[in-house]
Image (tube, rainbow, N blue to C red):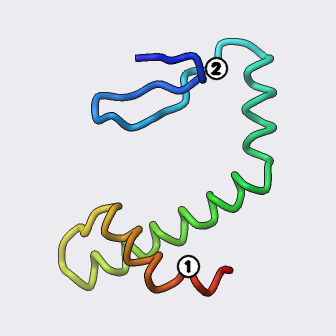
């Protein structure tokens, strides 16, 4: 399901970028990806994924994104302010 903002929801209700159809959208997407906010989010996302892997290995099963994200925020987010 597409909406006017350029995002669509997948079957799980998560938001995803719609496919790029022309060069104008590609330039807009490139600008977003080069922004400091997007780069900061990518760094945080990689940290959370690494934390998820460590904690999943320690637990012996996949702890999931939500649990890893909350746990990472509790233990690490104050050091980034």
Residue 33 figure quarter: top right
* Secondary structure state at the residue bearing disc 2: loop
Nearer to the camera, 80 or 25: 80
Q: Residue furthest top?
A: 22
Task: Please identify the quadrant where the N terminus is shown.
Answer: top left
Residue 20's label in the rendered image is 2
Residue in the picture at 18% in, 72% down: 61
Nearer to the camera, 56 or 78: 78
The spot of residue 80 in percent (x, y) is 65, 80
Query: Does residue 12 appear to the left or right of 26 in the view shown?
Result: left
Foreground label between 1 and 2: 1
Residue 72 vs 11, above or below: the answer is below
Nearer to the camera, 26 or 76: 76
Residue in the picture at 45% in, 35% down: 15
Residue 77's label in the rendered image is 1
Query: Does residue 17 appear to the left or right of 39 in the view shown?
Result: left
The spot of residue 22 in percent (x, y) is 72, 12
Query: Does residue 18 appear to the left or right of 62 in the view shown?
Result: right
Q: Earlier in the sequence, mark 1 or mark 2?
A: 2
* Secondary structure state at the residue bearing disc 1: helix
């Amino acid at each position: 399901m597409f909406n006017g903002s350029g995002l669509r929801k997948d079957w799980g209700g998560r938001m995803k970028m719609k496919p790029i159809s022309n060069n104008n959208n590609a330039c807009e997407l490139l600008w977003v990806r080069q922004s400091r906010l997007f780069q900061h989010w990518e760094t945080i996302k990689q940290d959370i994924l690494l934390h998820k892997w460590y904690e999943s290995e320690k637990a012996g099963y996949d702890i999931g994104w939500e649990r890893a994200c909350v746990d990472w925020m509790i233990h690490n987010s104050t050091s980034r302010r």
